[in-house]
Each structure stands twice: as structure tokens, then as C-alpha cells.
Amino acid sequence: MTSTGPLDLAIITGLSGAGRSTAAKCLEDLGWFVVDNLPPALLSTMAELGRRSNGAVSRIAVVVDVRGRAFFSDLRAAIDALDAAGTQPRVLFLEASDDVLVRRFEHVRRPHPLQGPDRVLDGIHRERTALAELRGEADLVLDTTDLNVHELRSKIDAAFGEPGGNRLNATVISFGYRYGLPLDADLVADCRFLANPHWVESLRPFTGQDPKVRDYVLEQPGAKEFLDRYAELLRLVGEGYLREGKRYLTLAVGCTGGRHRSVAVAEELAARLAATGAGVQVVHRDLGRE
């Protein structure tokens, strides 16, 4: 059954080297479903698939660039067809000055897509001319000449992010050192300084999710001070991540076996992160190994 919910569709285009890939990544981080180099003739099909997803895919961003130049003549017709079907796409056009684009291509040591046997600058001029009309019809034009990647992300967030959507998303992983560190951890907290419930016979069969074990761990000397200070550290790191345009943090919390202390501490730190407004998921990697 076709969904009647609204569908957001964004078209990312503009000059090669102006930041289309960065813009696409920004939208992906904001929760958009991103499709690279889709022919304009398939825009209506993609929109229809989104409408039929029953809300699973409600925001789609499509990168249309010079690699698909044979399809540019169809773009206007595709946008008109979308309008007629009730979906009004937003067109984001990225550009930069000639000298900055030349430097960017020289830095990556790749030819411009329209350069051919000529200079990089010739390819830039051809592309700028070919896209002049599309630029004039764009809903948002961003000149990235003087923008760094973080400033570009900020502008994308402002234009395409949801209200209140600029928040940290954290994954808290408990683990056992005997099984190795999680490879994707940004931060690692070691709670082996706390007394191990494994050596308490009445607690050994349970995990850090059990209230008896949790209370035992969190009431150990130094546990509260550690949690308070580490929570403050996470606040500072989280704020810094957001300033730098990073939305995702993976925190690993380890003990010897990943069953008692790390589980209890991970749950507590996750709760404190959630209380700050962060999106949090908890993964107990090594529960069940023993």
C-alpha cells in the first residue's frame, strides 16, 4: 500500500570539487537516504519507492553531477514530474571559485571530468557553463570557496536538519579485556579498578544488569567519583564533537570478562548520557561468553 506521508527529496548538484560528496555525507549523517549519481529519469521512481516505504524512507537525497551529463537535459522534466506528483524537491547547488577548484583538483591529482586533453581550468569553465541554468533554479546555492568542512556541515545542518536534530548519538559498549578491545571505540573507560563481583560467590552467577550486582559495583570506593568525572568528560567531548560536525561517539567500557563491572558501569554512563539529550544505545558485547 502506498504511504500517504510526506516525502522530502533533495537534489545535490553543482561543480565538481565544490563539496558534493561532503554535502551528501552530511545529509546521510542527518538520517537522509542518499543515492549517488542517479540519472534524473529515475528520480520519480525513487520518490515512488520512498512513498511506498510506509515511512521507513521519508527523506531521500540524490547526487546529480557531471558524470551523468547525458541526463541533464532530462532534469527539468524530472523535477516537473515530481511537482505534478506532489513531491517538490529542494535543489542544493554547490560552487566555488575557479582558483580554489583548480587547487583542489591539483591536490587530489585527478583530472576534471570535462577536462579532456585540455587544462583543469578548461573543464571547470565547461561545467560552469553547462550548469548555469540549473544554478539559477536552485533552492539553495552554497559557495564553498572559503568554507572548511565543519562550516559546510553547519550550513547543511541548518538547511536540512530537523529542529533539535543537532544532538550527539552515542553507542556504549561493555566488553572484556580478555576478548580484546572493540575496534571502533572512540573512547575507552577501564573499570578494573573496582572490586570484581566474580569473587563474591552469591553474585558470580549474575550479570551487571542485575540490581544486586549493579549496586555492589556502583557502591565501591571511587565508583561515584569516577562516574561523575567521566560523565563530565563525556559532556565536554560531546560538545566538542558537535562543534566539529561529528554526531557519533562510541564509548567502550571494559573489565576483565565483560560480565559484571563493565556492564553495570556502561548502563550507568549510558543513562547519564541520555539525560543530557544524547541518543544512546547500549551493547553488551561479551555477555554470554563465560
Image (cartoon, grey):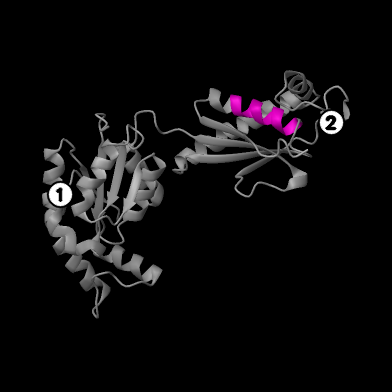
- Give the image location of residue 289, x and y in percent: 74, 40
| C-alpha gap between disc 1 and disc 2 | 64 Å
Is 231 magenta? The answer is: no
Residue 196 visible in the displayed image: no
Give yes or no for contact between labels 1 and 2 (Cβ–Cβ under 8 Å): no
Is 269 magenta? The answer is: yes
Image quarter of residue 165: top left
Name the amino acid, label 2. His
- Crowd around label 1: few <14 · some 14–19 · many ≥20 (10 Å): some
Q: At 61% across and 39% down in the image, what residue appears? A: 251
Q: Please name whichever residue, 155 or 183, is drawn nearer the observer in this view of the structure.
A: 183
Q: Please name whichever residue, 69 or 3, is drawn nearer the observer in this view of the structure.
A: 3
* Mark drawn on residue 78: 1
Residue 85 visible in the displayed image: yes
Most distant residue in the bottom direction: 117
Which quadrant would the N terminus be assigned to in this image?
top left
> Which range of residues does the magenta coloring cover?
261-271
Q: Viewed as shown, does residue 178 lie left or right of 102?
A: right
Q: Viewed as shown, does residue 244 lie left or right of 91?
A: right
- Give the image location of residue 61, x and y in percent: 30, 45
- Give the image location of residue 240, x and y in percent: 51, 39
